[in-house]
Image (cartoon, rainbow, N blue to C red):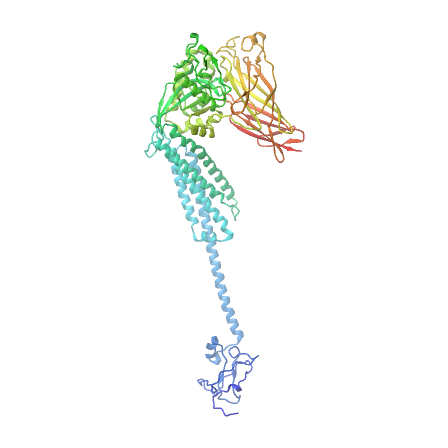
Amino acid sequence: MASRARGAVDFRDCRVTAPTRPRPDPELPRDLPVTISDQRSTPPPEPGRRSGGFGEPERLGDPGDAGTAKVVWTHPLDEIESERPAEALRPRWWVRRRRLLLWTLVALLVVGALAGFATWLALGLQDSAKKVKTSATAAQDELTAFKDVARTDQAAAKSHLEAAALQLASAHAAADTPQMHIAGKVPYAKIPVSDLGHLLTAADLSVEAGRDALDVAAAVQPKTTVGGAPGIYSNGSFNIPVLRQATAKAERIRDLMVRAERELLAVDGTGVKEQEVPGIRDKALSQARDLRRQMESAIPLLQILPPALGANGPKTYLVTINNQAEMHGSGGAPLSVGTVTLTNGLLGLGTPSSTSDYVFPKALPQPTARGNANPPLLWKPVKGDPFYAVGTYANGKQATPFVTAGLNPDFRVAGESMARAWQGGTGQEVDGVVSLDVSAIRQLLAVTGPVQAPGYGEINAGNIAQALLADVYATADSPARHQLNAALMGAIVQRLASGEQLTDKAKALAAVAPGRHLQMWMKDSSLQQTLTENGFAGAISDPDTGDHIAVYSQNAGLTKVDALQDRTVDEVVRLAADGSAAITRTVTQHNKAADRTHGVIKSEQSGWARTGLISLLPKGAKVTKSAPAESGLGSNAAIVAGKSGMLSALEKPLLVDALGRPWARQTVQIAPGAVLGQEFSFSAPKVAVPTDTGMTVTLTYDPDNALNVTNTRVVVIPPAGYRVAPGDGVQVLAGQGVVNVALDRQRTVSVSLVKG
């Protein structure tokens, strides 16, 4: 082997020693540089041998060479380790422990940070939730107080509404915190946070709607709003621009409630600690829907008011006050009549007059003994009206008095007939007919308070029916009674036209419309359609299937006791498997009038009732049995024979109107204090319709507008193989369905029959 200079290293002689860290050679200076004598490339470690960079230092060269340098194979990342003094190197276990301690410290710091964050988040959420709940509860209390006083005290209502807005602002602020935003991203709390946002937004929308409602309420005050702006009605004039603004407000309230419903429907209510949320959501949803539906009903009426009030040109309306002591199909005979005109909102009142005393300038002549009372008039009936009553007068002309123009129970026909008869008698074309009866006037007086009328004294809601429909016929003759009625109607019309309590009066009239005590007909088809859709047209239902229950009165003589009649209707419906039915209808009438004429039947003071009962039947019905006629009806024959009542023959064929609805008419005559029943039977082809589980019978009810409400009882007997199922308004007794309904408004009741 060639000689080697001291300090030089020959890699060919290098070998890997045991992985132990040797002690420093005391003879080797610490600052002795390491040199490589052989300039050849450093050979890589042999296979199976660990690289010096990952092993321990070893001595190179001959063990006996004290001056030989110690060289360590190092990885570049461990160079700093090779530069350390040899005595600074530590065992591997010590390094591992140091690293473990370092990671433990890091873990503790992370856990501490997480614990602090969790505490911060929990405390923040708890504080936010508490503040939100407190503010939201206070806001709800303020909104409830607003609703309670909105109709009576606008100043207090506004105060409550603004207080609710402040509380909601506080609730929003409490919900707008970093903790709440973070919780909204966490699955565990995402649903409650989202629900809170929807509930608060819905409450905000309710406050906005409340502000608009206050504006509308202020506008309908009689003179000016709280801020001094003009109201809808003042000094006998409707303010069309303000009315249109109120309509826009109502439309905005509707839209706000639609948005509120959407927010509330988005509330899940299944999150953590949300036990109370579904109840809060459902209550708010019900209130929002109610308000939205109210606006949807009011908006079409508000929209038609400007043109109806003469915004596009003058309008003239015929107004009648009807007498429920003398009933006709559509209501009482016109007791008083008059016209009103509206020009761009300005109201002009004509002088009301007793119908019997009104002088029709175009009337046909009649016997002198009758004077001007109800003269014959020439007018063309509505097409298809089977109730048009024709009389033959001088020169063979056929004419009908105005007073009998309203015989058709459906006011869509009767109102138009009255307009035609008025034009035939006066030459004046009207744009509509508004009909009220004593029930409607009674409701108005309950709101406005009593009126004073000559001959009557104080008339109020409690005594108007007795005074006007009963007492006056026992104490006053026709001329005196007509003067009293004209004076009374004048006082009532003035009260109705005044601007005071406009909203309350409108609500009072709207409340009696379902019972047909307020009915309107308009020549304009769009206005008429709106009235029909909202229940102000006095329309009769037109179902194609099921049973139709409705009974009306047609006064058949001079007697004026129709307001003193109590009536019930009983039906037995025997169904067949094919859905047809055999039906028996019994109309029972109790005459509660006193005997005031002692044996005279045909007199205004008589206590005898002479009524043409008009029964509406289901489509396709055919009468199969009726009571035979009794002779002497209308004369004193009943008194002579000692009978308490008599029946005429049921008219044949049935009356059928333009819509295909059949009507049965029969006259009854009942003594004072007596009870009489009218019974007849008929068949109907489509009473029940098939269903997946059996069949269903729909009972349709239409009200008359007599002073006293008619009560009905219908018994449905199922065919073999079927049974009646209990349902809403349906009792099951002895296997039969029993339905009891008062005829105070339109109703439908479904009776379900199940196979087996």
Regarding residue 110, the answer to whether it shows in the image is yes
Residue 145 spot, x, y in % from top left: 43, 37
Residue 127 spot, x, y in % from top left: 45, 50
Question: In which quadrant of the rendered image does the C terminus lie?
Answer: top right
Q: Is 532 or 164 nearer to us in this picture? A: 532
Q: Is 57 or 561 nearer to us in this picture? A: 561
Q: Quadrant of residue 728?
A: top right
Regarding residue 138, the answer to whether it shows in the image is no
In this rendering, the answer to whether 392 lies above or below 538 is above
Q: Is 335 or 111 nearer to us in this picture? A: 335
In the image, taking residue 377 as reference, residue 599 lies left or right, namely right
Toward the left, the furthest residue is 228
In this rendering, the answer to whether 71 lies above or below 564 is below
Residue 251 spot, x, y in % from top left: 41, 36
Q: Residue at the location (67% across, 31% down)?
A: 721
Residue 685 spot, x, y in % from top left: 60, 26
In this rendering, the answer to whether 633 lies above or below 133 is above
In this rendering, the answer to whether 389 lies above or below 523 is above
Q: How many numbered circles are shown?
A: 0
